[in-house]
Image (cartoon, grey):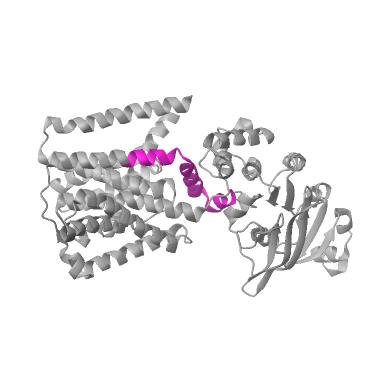
């Protein structure tokens, strides 16, 4: 009963939020505001992607930039070489990122905790170096530009909003399914999970693949939206960290967490980039340190704390 | 009685140390078998081999006539062998009910069915009043029972208990004895590792004694407690 009420409650909030997001373009906000909103939505997708593996499953990845980058290169190269629309290429970008994640998963599944995390970091660096050095195919350090007649910022906004809705629906479906229960168990204790009959290897690989799919889609979207990228923009550790921050600041292991994280962090980053270009990363870092120090369960954990009192 | 589990010439080395050596063991349907031995005798390693957490170097394991030697832990669980851990491993941030529900899932058709198995298991162990408690906040005495509840929720035919009463106070031990008997009455075969003789002597049908990885004695508790090799292993030559 209580659970049902809570669910209805969440559903109402989600629908109100969605209605506002759908309505925003009607008020014809400036191009800059739309740009920020698009970045927020993109970060929601990336945060959800990382959060599925890290927040729900407890497997910390420092290498999601690789999947993001694979998404960006896939859709862009498909457009440049065979003329495939990047919006279709986006799905293929997600799938290729999944394929990479599946292979990575089978290589690294035995590793636990920090060792798994380091292996994701190392493999992402390898992928970045490939992208930087395979000049003839990837454009190397110079990256790729895409001359592609984009519809309008409003259309792009709705595309990424659609991706956000799809991502959140998938995450919700997982969280209330058998897989969601298995993920919680794996996060809490891997050995105990094996002892109750969970195929932890399969679960990790599957989760990594689903997570990668959304990171890949995000990367494809970014490339088609920005029309230019290079390995230093999409494949560095900074990209991976951004996904982690969005999840952790909002609240790991919850669906609303990455939404809040993106709503907060993206505008903060933009504001400080304008106010103090020299120190913006410093301030951004400070915000994250303060949140982690005083709200270890993220902003969503704060609400829990107040409800208990 | 039917043979439920059999190990044949099971060996496991860690570097130069023979943790388990030439272990032959037969476990019969419905009995409570105790595994005892001094610290470092290889008891937990032997459990880990049976439950698939470690692979033996050689030898074989049969469960209900089927070879399970190379199977993985989760496959062995699904065959019907459940285990508890010496150091409790609760799913700390989940409620007690969810802990058991997720344990019941691999043998359930749906979340709902898993929940009803979980509730039934909680009722069976008299833990229903704790179902909404966060597992990690429970006292250790109850965590030991939660370990058993999680294992039972996988609906095992064989239950491996690794030092189930370590860390319990005397009244909790008394309660645990009742729990073990109740589980046996359900038709679950029990294989347990324990140190506390006061606990193990009255409830076990048979005992197996390990020392330096090998089986040194086997038989009814009364016979084992008088066995000179066993006394020597525990207390040294002069007492034998």
Asked if residue A170 lies in the magenta stretch, the reply is: yes
Residue at 37% in and 50% down:
A210
Q: Is residue A305 above or below residue B92?
A: above
Q: Nearer the viewer, residue A14 or A178?
A: A178
- Quarter of the figure that contains the C terminus of chain B: bottom right
Q: Is residue A186 visible?
A: yes
Q: Nearer the viewer, residue A20 or A139?
A: A139
Residue at 81% in and 47% down:
B203
Asked if residue B220 lies in the magenta stretch, the reply is: no
Q: Is residue B37 visible?
A: no
The chief SS type of the magenta part is: helix
- Residue B12 lies, in percent from the top left, at 66, 68
- Residue A284 lies, in percent from the top left, at 24, 48
* B43 left or right, relative to A124: right
Provide the residue span drawn in magenta: A167-196
- Residue B187 lies, in percent from the top left, at 75, 43
Q: Nearer the viewer, residue A83 or B45?
A: A83
- Residue B172 lies, in percent from the top left, at 72, 40
Count the marks.
0
* B186 left or right, relative to A46: right
Residue at 32% in and 56% down:
A97
Q: Is residue B62 above or below residue A183?
A: below
List the single residue furthest toward the bottom: B16
């Amino acid at each position: 009963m209580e659970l049902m009420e809570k669910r209805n409650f969440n559903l109402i909030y989600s629908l109100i939020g969605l209605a506002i997001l759908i309505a925003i373009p009607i008020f014809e906000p400036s191009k800059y505001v739309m740009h920020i909103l698009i970045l927020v939505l993109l970060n929601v997708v990336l945060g959800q992607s990382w959060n599925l593996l890290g927040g729900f499953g407890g497997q910390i990845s420092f290498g999601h930039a690789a999947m993001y980058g694979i998404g960006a290169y896939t859709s862009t190269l498909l457009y440049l070489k065979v003329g495939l629309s990047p919006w279709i290429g986006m799905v293929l970008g997600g799938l290729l990122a999944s394929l990479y994640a599946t292979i990575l998963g089978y290589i690294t599944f035995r590793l636990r905790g920090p060792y798994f995390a380091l292996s994701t970091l190392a493999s992402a660096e390898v992928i970045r170096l490939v992208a930087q050095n395979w000049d003839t195919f990837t454009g190397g350090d110079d990256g790729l530009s895409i001359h592609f007649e984009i519809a309008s910022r409003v259309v792009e906004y709705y595309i990424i909003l659609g991706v956000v809705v799809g991502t959140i629906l998938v995450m919700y479906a997982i969280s209330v399914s058998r897989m969601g229960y298995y993920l919680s168990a794996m996060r809490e204790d891997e050995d105990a999970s094996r002892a109750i009959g969970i195929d932890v290897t399969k679960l990790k690989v599957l989760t990594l693949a689903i997570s990668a799919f959304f990171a890949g889609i995000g990367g494809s979207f970014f490339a088609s939206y920005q029309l230019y990228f290079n390995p230093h923009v999409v494949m560095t550790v900074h990209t991976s960290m951004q996904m982690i921050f969005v999840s952790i600041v909002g609240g790991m292991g919850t669906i609303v967490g990455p939404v809040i994280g993106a709503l907060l962090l993206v505008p903060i980053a933009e504001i400080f980039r304008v106010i103090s270009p020299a120190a913006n990363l410093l301030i951004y870092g400070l915000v994250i340190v303060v949140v982690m120090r005083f709200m270890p369960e993220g902003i969503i954990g704060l609400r829990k704390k107040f409800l208990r009192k | 009685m039917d043979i439920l589990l059999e190990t044949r010439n099971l060996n496991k080395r860690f570097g130069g140390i023979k943790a388990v050596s030439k272990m032959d063991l037969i476990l019969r349907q419905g009995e409570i078998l105790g595994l005892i031995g001094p610290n470092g005798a290889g008891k937990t390693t032997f459990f880990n081999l049976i439950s698939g957490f470690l692979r033996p170097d050689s030898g074989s394991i049969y469960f209900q006539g089927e070879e399970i030697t190379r199977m993985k832990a989760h496959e062995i669980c699904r065959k019907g062998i459940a285990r508890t851990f010496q150091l409790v491993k609760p799913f700390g941030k989940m409620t007690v009910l969810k802990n058991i529900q997720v344990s019941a899932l691999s043998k359930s058709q749906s979340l709902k069915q898993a929940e009803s198995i979980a509730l039934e298991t909680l009722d069976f162990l008299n833990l229903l009043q704790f179902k909404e408690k966060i597992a990690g906040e429970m006292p250790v005495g109850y965590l030991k029972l939660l370990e058993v509840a999680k294992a039972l929720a996988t609906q095992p035919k064989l239950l491996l208990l690794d030092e189930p009463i370590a860390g319990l106070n005397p009244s909790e031990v008394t309660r645990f004895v009742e729990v073990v008997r109740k589980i046996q009455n359900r038709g679950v075969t029990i294989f347990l590792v324990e140190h506390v003789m006061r606990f193990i002597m009255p409830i076990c049908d048979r005992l197996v004694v390990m020392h330096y990885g090998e089986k040194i004695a086997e038989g009814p508790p009364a016979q084992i407690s008088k066995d000179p090799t066993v006394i020597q292993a525990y207390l040294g030559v002069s007492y034998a």
